[in-house]
Every structure is written in C-alpha cells, then in structure tokens.
Image (spheres, rainbow, N blue to C red):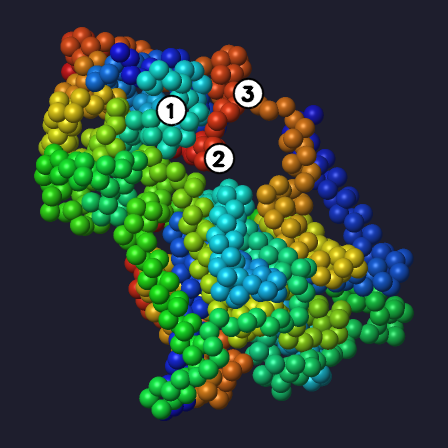
Amino acid sequence: MSTAAATVRRRRVRLVLVAVVAVLLVAAPLILPAFANQTLVRIGVYAVAVLGLNIIMGYTGQVNLGQIFFVGLGAYVTAYGVNHGWNILLVFVAACAIAGVVGLLVALAAARLGGLAIAMVTIALPIVGVPLAKRLADFTGGSQGVSARFTDAPDWSGLANDQWQFYIVLVVVAGAFLLARSLVHGKYGRAFAAVRENEAVAASMGISPYRTKVLAFTIASVFGGASGFLYLAAVQYTSPETLSFGHSISLLAAMVIGGAGSIAGSLLGGAYYVLVPQLTNAIDPNLTTVSQGAILLAVLFLLPGGLVSLPRVVRRLTRRPPARRSISRPAAETSQQTTPAHRPVPDAAPEEREQTERQDGP
Amino acid sequence: METFIQLVVDGLATGSIYAALALAIVLVNQATGLINFAQGGMAVLSAYIAYVFVQLGLPIIVAILIAVVLSFVFGALVERFLVRRFERGDPDTAVVVTIGLLTLVTGISAVLWGYNNLAFPSLFPLTSVEILGAVVSVRSLATAVTIVVIMVVLQLLFLRTKLGLALRAVADNPSSAAFSGLPVGRLLMVGWGLAATLGAIAGVLVAPQLTLTPGMLDTALVYALAAVILGGLNSPIGCVVAASAIGVLENLVAVYVPLIGHDLKIAVPFVLIFVILILRPQGLFGRKVVVRV
Amino acid sequence: MTLLELKAVTASYGPVQVLDGVSLSVPEGGSVGILGANGAGKTTTLRAISGTVRTGGTIRFDGRDIRGLRSDQVAALGIAHVPEGRGTLGQLSVRENLLVGAYLRRDRKAIETDIEYCLDLFPQLQDRVGSRAAALSGGEQQMLAVGRAFMARPKLLLLDEASLGLAPGTAKTVYQAIRRLRLESGIAMLVVEQNANLAFSLVDTATVLETGRNVLTGTSAQLKGMDEIRRAYLGG
C-alpha cells in the first residue's frame, strides 16, 4: 500500500475514533449516575488546570509552583460576577482574562530571572494568595469563602443539574484541549520546545526566550482562570483554601504523574488529582501526603514520562535492543565486534554511568 | 524606640533562621547544581527526631546533638540514593524531585506525629534582658548569635581546611577534581549532610516559637528562597545579609505599616525581589554567570 | 619495565563506538605520543585510561588491571590526567588549585616545596598565586593544570591537547616547561597532541590513530622521516 493511501487510511481511522469518542462523551452523562458525572466533571476542571501547567512547565520547561493561584483567582472572579448578576459568558471571559492579565504581570517580572528563580518566585503566589484572599473580604468573602450557584439546569433542557454541569465542563475542556493542541503543534509549540532545550540556542535561532516564557506563562494563567470558572461551576463554592500551597504541589505532582509535555497526559493528571486522594483518604487521611510523595518519586525514577508514556515504555522494553553503530565498520559486522564493549563492568561506580552518556567527541 | 529595638532583635533572630536555610540551599546548589525545595521539610523531620529524644527524657541539648548528627546522615543518604541521578542534569527535573521529597518528608512527619502542633522545649531560657531601654528576649539574641557562630565555623571549614578545599573543588568541577583523586561521590554526600545539619539546627532553634508541625518551615523556606534570590546563588554572604534584612523588614512592616500588617508581611520580600531584580538580575551580591552553548 | 599497557582497547559513547582496538605501551620514565586527526579517538584513549568512559579490552598499569576503576581510584594509583580544556578549578585560587593536586598526599613540607618548584617551572604563575584561576589566560591555565597534575607526584602524566587554543609562542613555552619537568622528575608521559612538531619535542615514540585504531607506530625519529606524517601533520 502506498504511503499516501496509508496516511489517508490512518486519518480516516482517527476521525472515526474521534467521532466515536465524541458520541460517547455526549451520551455518557445521560447514562451514568450522578456521582460518576460529578467525578468526571471534577476531573475535567483539574485537567484544564494541569493542561495550563503543562504548557509552561511540560512544554516550555519552566517550573511553575503557582498555577493553583490562578485557579483560585478564576474561581473568585466567577463567584463575584455571578453574584453580581453578570452574563455568564462575560463571567467566563472575565475569569480567563483577569487571570491572564495577572499572569502576564507576574511573568513579565519573573521571566527575567533564570529558570529556577521562576520556581522560587511562583512559590510566593499561593503563599501570598491565601492571606490576600482572607484580607480582601469585600471581594472574596474572607476566610468564609463565597458561594455562587449558576449551573442549575434550565427547564428547557430537561436535564438534571449534574448532567448540565457535565456539558458545560465538556465544552470548555474540549475547547481548551483543542486550543492547546493547535498551539503546541504550531510555531509556538516549536518555540516552547526550543526554549526548553537550550535558551541560548533558541535565541540564536531568533526565538526570544523571554517573550516565549512570558507567552507560555500567560497562556497557563488563562487556562488556570478557565479552570477556576469550571471549579466554581462544579463545586459552587470557593475559599482561600482553594489556592493553598499544598494544592499547588499536588497539581504539579499530578502533571508530572499524568505526563509532562503531553496533552493526553493532562487528562490523566486531572484524573489522578481527583481520584487518588479520594482513594487514600478513604484508607487513612494521614497517609495521603506520604503516598503522594512516594508516587511522585516513583514516577520520576521509573517512568519519567508519566503514566501517558506507559504504553511506549512497555513496547520498548519488549523489543530487542538494536545493534551498536560503529563509525568504521558497516552495521552487519558490528554485532560480533562490539560484545567486548557491551560487557558490563562490575566495579563501575554510578558516576561512570552518567559520564558515558556525555556526547562530547573523542 | 524600645519597640523598634525589640522588633529589630526579633527580626534578626528570625532572619538568622532564614539565613541558615538559605545557606543550606546555596551549599547544595553550589555542590550539585540544584535547588533543594525539601530543605525546610528535612529540617522539620530533624526537629521531630529531637522531640522524640526529649520525650524519652534526654536533656534538650543532647537530643539536639543526636538529631543534628542523624540529620547529617540523612542528608548524605538523600544525596546518594535520591538525588544523585538528577545532579548536573536538567535542573527543573531535579527541582520536581526535591518537591517529591518535600511531600514525602512532610507526609512521614504527618503519619508519625499527626498534624497537631506539638510543644518543643527551648534550648535557651525564656527570660529577657534590657538593651538600650528595650526589653529583648534572650532566646532571640541567643538564636541569632548561635547561628552566626555556626556560619562562621562553616566559612572557616570551607576556606581553611582540606575538607573545605575538597568540597569547593568538587562544587567547581567534579570530573576535574576526580582527576586529582578526590572522591567526588563521598564529598557530595558530605556537602548534603552539612546542609541538612544547618537546616536541623535552624529547625530545633525555631521550633519552640512556631510549635512543631509538619508544615512548620514552609513559610520560612519561602523567605529563605527570597533571600537566595536577593543575595545571589553564588554569594553566601549576600544570602545571609538578605535573610537578616528580610527578617527585620518583615517585623518592622508588620507593625509600622498596618495596611500590610502581620498577615500580608510575607508579600514584602517578593515585592522587594521584583523591584530589585528588574534592575539587577543577578541579585544584590551575585556575579553574572555566563552560559556557554 | 612497562608502566602502562593498552591492548585492543575499545570504547563507546552510547551506541557510537569510538575506539576500535587501540594498543600502546609506555615504559617507566618513558614518553609516548598519540597523534591523529580530529575524531580519531586520541582523547578517548586517555579517557579510557582514567576511567571516564566505558571500555573493553585490556588496560594494565604497574602490573594491575585498571579497567573499570573510577577516575579518583585511577588517580590514587599514580596517574595524573590533564584533561582537554585544562579542567582548571576556576573559583579556586592558583595556590588552591595546586593544593588540590596534592590532595592524596600527607607530607606537608614536601607539598610546599613542590609548590615552589611549580612556580619556578612556570614563572608566569608567580605573581598570580592568589588570583582566582578563572581569571588567568589560556596559557597560564594550561601551566596551572600541568602544575596541579605534577603536585600529585604521579608515575604517569596524561596530557591532552596541551597546545589547544594557545598562541604558538605560548604553546612552545608550555612544552619547554613540560620537557624540563620530564628531565628533572623522570615522570612517564602519554601525550595527545595534534601539533606533531610539539609532540615530537617531548616524546620518544608515538602512535598514530585513525578512526579508533592504530595505523602507525614508531620512534619519533622514524615517524618524523615518513612522508605521510610530514604531509599530514608537519606541513609538507
């Protein structure tokens, strides 16, 4: 079969797959019980937040410890707008835009610093955000938090509340993921990757690391704001606790565990964020933190690409290792000659392993 | 005036805690090239260990010494088994590893001792002394002095001893240092052990005031990071000065600027950072680092 | 007495094999050169000896098999490696660099004497003793690197491209000092050098590498006379 025909066939298969998934997603809330719908809704909420974090961290390589701050900010803006009778679409736009503007301001300053300094500075966002939220009680309801109900199903739809919420979240999540996908596969995605690899090289290619980082961070904040909107849609209440430091770390862990630098991984990350703490809390609430830490470390050591890379890793492990290339001999002969070099050296210390990975020449 | 002196002395005491954590972070960064976000969490675990020995009836100073020694071992083991694989690689991955470590260590503290605040005995008497008409807590003074002494001892270690020379050589160029016979791996473990020790001392000195809880040093870590940013990653003196300034400033602002007050004083170092770093990206004392492609 | 012996040594960086059977030997007190073009495997050969790359084949030093040892273990046996790029400890002072070289020694008085000797060997370092090494010029850093290696009082000195990046006059001065070092201390040397003229001023025998294998071996006199060498390395 010619490659052109194969490509067309693959694309057709993918379209069919997407259509099937779309139908399933539209039909699901009508079939599933309310509890399942609510869980899926919450997964969607955090998937968007993780997706935003992925854009700045997974794709552009800048550690961001403040994503949850933008989620909280979006939630508060949403609550404020709803309680003041704004049009729902305006509320959504405001949540995204305000989070984006704040993110832009933070990024304009923070991106000037070296990569690690961004981490050190964004850690301040949730830490400062909590007392700030408590202080600005006029806008935020202070330590008590604020409720806002706006996702009751309208009568004309004939749906239950949880089903209506599902569709709202589905629309936003789908939009966010499609937007992210087109971003990442386009020229911005290439800029992100270049900056993550090596900023000096990116600069020499005409990509401004500073501007790229600011852009990625702003986009991440916008996604955070959208996630906050969804959060309020689902939970209908927010408080300073929403943007606490602990949640910030959990979100980051969820991103890494789901799969850094992967759109699909963000979905897994959202699922992890919602489902796993539920599980550990059911067993013993005190165990939650320990198990989170242990799982994150296990993933970093054993599966650095996150859960989304599991199929790829399994495939690689079950394949035979390729023969070594030699610079002076054709590939066919190398399999016998290279065995001496293959022989594991028993006394080798860990440092040696790292040093063989260096690619500097003879 | 008296309030001012009190605030300054208390500020120097808290500042010295931030300074100890900041120095530990700088030490680890110079040796292995990464920022250890778990430095505070590890220090808290050490304080819990000291707490256990106090509960067993040992005098507080003995309990502290045991905890400090154990923290050295713990720091060395963390370097060897957890962090080594990520050293000198992508620093952002290494950061996430330390965040995982922070979560793990906080979780262990929570499992073993719960989230309740535990009372930790003070090494220094809780009396006060009069300085220039102000009533100053002995504990604050003693804390600040102790940490300053320890930092001076560390500086002497680094600049005057063979071990210190070896640690600096390994931090500078580990593969080249190995060519002169330096046992790089073992020296890195010592570096991390020393950093953990610094953190442990800070932890046990501040625990009586903050009360022992798994998240006790989370905020202090944030201040310490601010001090590192302001002081520059390759200037220990800069970090100490910045940390002391932050400690004093946050106290003064909390009292004299009611708009900010105690709850928002944490924002002060970061506003400071934003302003200063826009003008001088390498920090107040640091040197510009040239990165070769 | 053979001090160092390499037999059919292979080495690879990941999937790329760079050394494909290199053999050479260095007698006690002797001086051997490794010549060849870029990418021939010269530096990798030195790295194979000092344990910074995974190898196959046989590497024996002073009678014992040293393949697989860590760099610091190899150094402890008496091999001092002056790496490509010098490996100067930039943040340490010149004096501290020399002291690091003597890390494995305990004879403090002799160490001080040796530092004096280094400064006599490389007079340009004398008034830079307290300066940070990173502030030195390329030539001074090269001298410092050789001095640091000497401070270990090694039996064998591995010298990697000592003339790299240096002006011809400076390179010559460095090599003259190294020659004096060899004459006065009797240290054996294995010298990797692209500049064959400089190499021949220091070594008794040499081997030429090409794509990871020996293609020519002989005494300096023999090699200097050969047409191929003259054309390829000595400028006609």
Q: Nearer the viewer, mark 1 or mark 3?
A: 1
Amino acid at pointer 1: Ala
Residue A15 in view, yes or no? yes
Q: Nearer the viewer, residue A335 or A14?
A: A335
Residue sitting at x 53%, y 75%: B209
Among the 4 quarters of the image, the one containing residue A209 = bottom left
Task: Locate the C terminus of chain A and report the quarter of the image it occupies.
Answer: top left
Chain letter behind tag 2: A
Where is residue A280 shown, x and y percent of the image? 75, 57
Residue C48: assigned label: 1
Q: Residues within 10 Å of mark 3 (few under 14, many from 20)?
A: some
Do labels 1 and 3 touch, CB within 8 Å?
Answer: no
Residue A350: assigned label: 2
Chain letter behind tag 3: A
Do labels 3 and 2 touch, CB within 8 Å?
Answer: no
Amino acid at pointer 3: Ala
Where is residue C85 shown, x and y percent of the image? 28, 36
Q: Nearer the viewer, residue A187 or B141?
A: B141
Please name the residue that numbered disc 3 is placed on. A323
Left or right: residue C124 compared with residue B67: left
Secondary structure category for the residue under label 3: loop
Where is residue A322 shown, x and y percent of the image? 57, 23
Q: Nearer the viewer, mark 1 or mark 2?
A: 2
Mark 3 or mark 2, earlier in chain: 3
Task: Tell me the CA gap for discs 1 and 3.
Answer: 22 Å
Q: Residues within 10 Å of mark 1 (few under 14, many from 20)?
A: many
Q: Are marks 3 and 2 on the same chain?
A: yes
Residue sitting at x 16%, y 25%: C185
Task: Tell me the CA gap for discs 3 and 2.
Answer: 24 Å
Left or right: residue C168 compared with residue B287: left
Amino acid at pointer 2: Pro
